[in-house]
Image (cartoon, grey):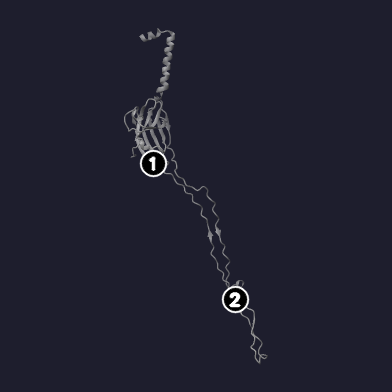
């Protein structure tokens, strides 16, 4: 009651000034601390990202297939066919009688004709067919994602549940995937990889080397966070949901727990 009487006793100018301070303080608290986020759920449900092929060997263009080439065999004719038989006839050769006293009474000269027949032999070649086979296109199928780690969230600053999976993609990058995530919402939340081991310490994960994977996409659902191929995952032990504004870790999980 005294406080009320005191406020009522203030001048109008003082009352206005006090009201402005209270309103300004309320706006600052809402804008900076964002307490309303503790009561608002953001659901993000992402499918697993498609793997990236590392190699793909394929023909740039498929050449046209050449038509079969057929060699027509020559016509076969029987050797006895008169059309293919060539007769070579020698010129008549006169046989002169030897000179002698009775040459005038001898028989007239005998003309001998010699005929030589040359047989033509025709060889038939078997038909030859040449076919050009179509080129074969070979495509290298990329290796699928490899599951490296499976772990569960532990509650540090706020309660939370869900599964953390780590996959290696064919191109050397990694995917940190949250499945069935259900954690508290809050202001300025980041997903980080930390060199710290899994400990119940809200500030431990940012006190050592850490790598930000970006803002937390939502406090519920299934989400993917990409780790570039040039990042050595062995340098980090845990993944954490970390409030950068207040250096406050909400949840953490291991990233090198072999799958069962």
Q: Which residue is mark 2?
A: 117
Instruction: Point out the residue furthest to the right here.
Output: 104
Is residue 120 or residue 194 the one in the foreground?
Answer: 194
Mark 1 vs mark 2, CA separation in Å: 87 Å
Tally of numbered tags: 2
Q: Quadrant of residue 67?
A: bottom right
Check disc 1 and report its element: helix, strand or loop.
strand
Q: From the viewer's perspective, tell me whether residue 257 is left or right of residue 83.
A: left
Q: Which mark is residue 146?
A: 1
Is residue 194 or residue 86 the one in the foreground?
Answer: 194
Check disc 2 and report its element: helix, strand or loop.
strand
Quarter in which the C terminus is drawn = top left
Q: Residue at x 59, y 76 (%)?
A: 117
82 lies above or below 39? below
Q: From the viewer's perspective, tell me whether residue 137 is left or right of residue 38.
A: right
For label 1, count other residues whose C-alpha is less than 10 Å away and answer few (under 14), some (14-19) or many (20+): few
Q: Position of residue 121 (x, y in %)?
A: 56, 71
Q: Residue at x 38, y 29 (%)?
A: 242
Quarter in which the N terminus is drawn = top left
Q: Quadrant of residue 244?
A: top left
Q: Position of residue 156 (x, y in %)?
A: 33, 28
89 lies above or below 71? below
């Amino acid at each position: 009651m005294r406080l009320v009487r005191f406020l009522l006793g203030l001048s109008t100018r003082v009352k206005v000034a006090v009201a402005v301070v209270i309103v300004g303080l309320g706006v600052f608290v809402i804008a900076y601390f964002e307490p309303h986020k503790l009561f608002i759920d953001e659901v993000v449900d992402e499918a697993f990202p498609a793997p990236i092929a590392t190699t793909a060997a394929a023909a740039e263009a498929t050449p046209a297939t050449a038509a079969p080439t057929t060699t027509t065999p020559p016509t076969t004719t029987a050797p006895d066919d008169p059309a293919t038989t060539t007769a070579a006839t020698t010129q008549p050769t006169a046989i002169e009688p030897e000179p002698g006293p009775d040459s005038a009474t001898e028989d007239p000269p005998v003309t001998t004709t010699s005929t030589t027949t040359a047989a033509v032999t025709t060889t038939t070649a078997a038909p030859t067919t040449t076919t050009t086979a179509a080129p074969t296109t070979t495509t290298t199928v990329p290796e699928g994602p490899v599951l490296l780690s499976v772990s569960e969230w532990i509650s540090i600053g706020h309660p939370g549940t869900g599964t953390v999976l780590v996959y290696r993609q064919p191109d050397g990058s990694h995917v940190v995937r949250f499945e069935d995530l259900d954690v508290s919402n809050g202001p300025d939340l980041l997903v980080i990889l930390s060199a710290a081991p899994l400990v119940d310490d809200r500030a431990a994960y940012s006190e050592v080397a850490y790598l930000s994977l970006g803002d937390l996409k939502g406090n519920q659902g299934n989400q993917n966070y990409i780790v570039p191929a040039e990042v050595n995952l062995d340098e980090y032990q845990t993944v954490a949901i970390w409030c950068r504004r207040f250096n406050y870790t909400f949840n953490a999980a291991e990233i090198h727990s072999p799958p069962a």
